[in-house]
Amino acid sequence: MCGIVGYIGKADAPTVLLNGLRRLEYRGYDSAGIAVLDDDRIVISRAAGKVAVLSDRVRAEWPAERFARVTTGVAHTRWATHGPPTEVNAHPHLDRSGDIALVHNGIIENYRSLRSRLESNGHRFHSETDTEVLAHLIGECDRGDFFQAVCDALHQVVGTFGIAVLSAREPEKIITARRGSPIVIGIGAGETIIASDAAAILAHTQRVIYLDDDDIAIVTAEGVEIRDLHNIPVTREITELGYDAAAAEKGGHEHFMLKEIHEQPDALANAIRGRLDFNLGSAVLAGMGTSARELADLQRVVLLGCGTSMHAGLVGEYAFEDLADIHAEVQQAAEFRYRNPILGSRDLVIAISQSGETADTLAAVREANQKGAFVMSLCNVVGSTIARETGRGVYLHAGPEISVASTKAFTCQVAVLLMMALKLGRGRRFSREEGIRFAREIEQLPALVGKVLRQNARIAEIAWEYAFNEHAFFIGRGPMYPVALEGALKLKEISYIHAEGYHAAELKHGPIALLQQGTPVIAIACDVPGKDKTLGNIEECCARGAKVLGLVTERDHETAERMHDFITIPRCHPLVATIPAVVALQLFSYHVARLRGCEIDQPRNLAKSVTVE
Ligand code: G6P
């Protein structure tokens, strides 16, 4: 949520900054801005709208020779929290003197009281943002030592921040700091880049440092010096990123979402690689950091997440109960700390988050830690806050996910949860042979997903039939119930069709009142327990004129014939089938949204990483 970039080093810094913003645009895309040092003066440009608008403005307004010689600057792409997405609210914000420029990701919770205090000292504000208050506060604290001024200001702040600050009075450095919002620093040859996410750094270097909360760093072209907010030096190790810039490119696809859908066989292969033990019939997940005795002693699994990640948790709930005979439940992470979660040391809490930065999931992790539960995470972004705070867990290794609508992260989350359930199951219920059989099913996942992807052209064809309705219902039972929820979420996120997911049995308890002639119902009617009952529910929909698109198991001609349209799902274990089934729904949503001319990778009002409550 909001992307920040800072650069110091070689000439043509504005190009580096604008390219970096483009990479981070998935974090927010309602307005953008840039501030650079030119002849030791701060020059700023901001625009409402996407980064492309800012980029055109900068190139039109800044003389090319000035543009080329600039070596230092900061930039921002915004997802509005305080004040609408106007030019005046866009970052960077300046202090009173105009010599300090700040970009910020996060929320300054006490900005109102800070603002009134500053106003009584004569400060005048131009925007409605919390960020402008912090810029003025840093200016107010500056008594000739820029670093100390940022430290002193941050001591007065309540809330979260990832910041990068420039001062015209000390042009040879950028100060960056974090609390709750990510900051990664790329160490290049004669250049250093600051960003909210490594995606903005990839084109320059593989060597990065992740700041911890309350770290504050002095960044120069030669490198970085990190201290804590009390000015005590701290050491943070350099990590190699391990993936190249191509991973964050569209690679010939029309959209990142389509690319990421098609990457799923590889992403799943990466998530599974080296983690199945066919000898023991179990899974090897060293990051869980649990002994067999601890696993055997667990009494409950609690899965936490938001959005798509919560839906993955719902599939996990079925997997833990079916495979490991252990009570499992999903809790919506935003609600978790506001109720009284009953947790103890025999409860395993798994926080699921693609980004590892979702504020609500992070807060839930902290609550679970307080209650003394066994907490671990399932994240995609290596080194993310949730991954680091839990200290143990399993990475997805799905590669960067750029499209705001999550696809490959979901399927890899489910794959890892199936492996976790297998591991627990082997200690509690499964024989070696049963374990081996299930491990073989998981191993097939890349091929199973490949079979669905090969129906892409057919699914695109089917989409025509459903693209111009304004409502849609998704129904399923058992582990396909969360798949129905995820299918509906995907469709509404990117096509803006009003879509709802229901347990197939629930439709007749109310929503069926909304069915009319031609209302689309997307029914997951594969071979899972309760399929016959779902077929009965489909009949109920057809009797009221609904148009049914069914997901049916391959070669189940009898079921297929009862649908208006169908997509086939390969025959496999019902829990494993959730993954190819969701891939079919991802493709369906994608093609519907494309036919409707929607902004698929950056849907309106959304952001990929939600770092506010
Ligand atoms: C946002 C995104 C969703 C995502 C959710 C949780 O709402 O738009 O796609 O599922 O956050 O994100 P996380 O990074 O925690 O999985």
Image (tube, rainbow, N blue to C red):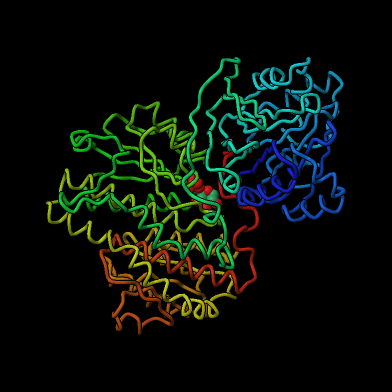
Residue 42 % position (x, y)? 82, 34
Q: Quadrant of the rendered structure where residue 251 is?
A: bottom right
Left or right relative to 568: residue 234:
right
Left or right relative to 455: residue 602:
right
Left or right relative to 154: residue 531:
left
The answer to whether one can see residue 528 in this image is: yes
Residue 324 % position (x, y)? 21, 48
Quadrant location of the C terminus in the rendered image: top right
Residue at 37% x, 60% y is 481
Work out whether 100 lies above or below 65.
above
Work out whether 15 lies above or below 534.
above
Residue 466 % position (x, y)? 53, 76
Residue situated in front as seen by the camera: 493 or 268: 268
Q: Quadrant of the rendered structure where residue 76 is?
A: top right
Residue at 28% x, 50% y is 274
Left or right relative to 324: residue 604:
right
Residue situated in front as seen by the camera: 115 or 291: 291
Quadrant location of the N terminus in the rendered image: top right
Residue 384 % position (x, y)? 49, 38
Q: How many marks?
A: 0
Residue at 81% x, 44% y is 45
